[in-house]
Amino acid sequence: MQLRSIIATGLVALGASAIGYAQEAPIGSPTEKDRKEKKALEELKGELDGKIVWSTSRSNSKHDIWIMNADGTDKKPLTESPNHVDWFSRFSPDGSNVLFVRSKIGWVDEMDAEQNDKWDVWVTKMDGSKEKKLAENACWGTWRPSGDSIVFARGSKVFVKSLDTGDESEIFDAEAFFDKKRVYSQQPELSPDGKFLAITVRGTKRETGIYNRETKEWHGTGGGCQINWFPNSRRVLRMNEGQGNGGTEVLAIKVKDNGEPTTRIRGLRVPKEIRFMDLPGRRSHEYFPVIDKQTSNWMVWCATQKGHAHDIANYEMYIWNINTNKKKDYVRLTFHSGNDRWPDIYVTQ
């Protein structure tokens, strides 16, 4: 009886260990390009100068930040942190630094992004040097246009932190505003003009919206997630879930001077004019879209054809000049069976 108990305990421990290991992302391996994909990459060369950063598991199952040229060439690691998860990287306004989120220790699932005690916000130079922690117990860090302050979430609250003085100022509290417990602020992004906060709320309330900092009004933009600004502060990208070719699609919604969307989304009725990108073919489960802040011409995002988990599934990266045909002029940038997520792009003017 005692032997059986010991064996059973051992099997449980082994199973738990295997499950824990399986939770990490696959390192994967390079995959082949087809003739059309090779041609598109060749034609992209010379079209733009710039850099892209993103989080990938291709060299570390917990994820590092990698960097490449905006045309998909010269891919290399920017951070190398085998005992941490590095993700959600964002270029500074002048392109000299990269902000990113790092787990305090070990593998932490992206689903735990609201658990701020598991994350810190860090910065590094473009060559990977001078790593520095900027905000403790924080997630979803983004830059202000001046480059001297950052915005981040800490549970239900959103803060702006001065990098000169170190002072933190609370600008939004989802629990207090919606008068509900366990409401979390995810991916908060101030508009470039500073008037509005675009945000995804999760927990006991689930929606996206725009908060007018002056009037203290909330303007809902529907369900979904991942809402962020165009550089003109009058348009947002937003992920729409449950519709689209692969179960998701990217929307682009114009915003009035008070932060209210010009087009209302009611239930499953999504007007055609705000449907921005939905890849044809099987690899069309899109997420992580962002517009370059220098020219407003280029969007990068990722898509998978199987699975959904943002930090595990085989997402591949794409780029598209938004002034061209969305059905045929996009270009796939990555070809690897590991996980690629949350890109950002800096275009040299």
Image (cartoon, rainbow, N blue to C red):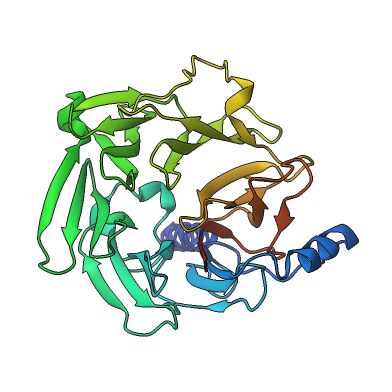
The percent position of residue 128, horizontal first and vertical second, equals 42, 82
Q: Which residue is drawn at 21% across and 25% down?
A: 178
Q: Is residue 309 above or below residue 81?
A: above
Where 196 falls versus 161 (above or below)? above
Q: Which quarter of the figure has residue 22?
A: bottom right
10, above or below 188, in the image = below
The residue that appears at 20% across and 63% down in the rendered structure is 136
In the image: residue 273, left or right of residue 181? right
Q: In this view, does 340 lie to the left or right of 104?
A: right
| Viewer-proximal residue among 62 and 183 | 183
Q: Which residue lies furthest to the front in this view?
A: 349
Residue 177 makes an appearance in the image: yes
The picture places residue 303, in percent across and down from the top left corner, at 64, 48
Residue 105 occupies quadrant:
bottom left
Q: Against 307, is 52 above or below?
A: below
Q: In which quarter of the image is the N terminus?
A: bottom left
- Residue 104 appearing in the image: no
Q: Which residue is drawn at 63% across and 46% down?
A: 322
Depth check: give the residue in front, 245 or 73.
Answer: 73
The number of numbered discs placed on residues in the rendered structure image is: 0
Residue 117, x across and y down, in percent:
23, 56
Residue 88, image x, y percentages: 42, 59
Q: Nearer the viewer, residue 173 or 107?
A: 173
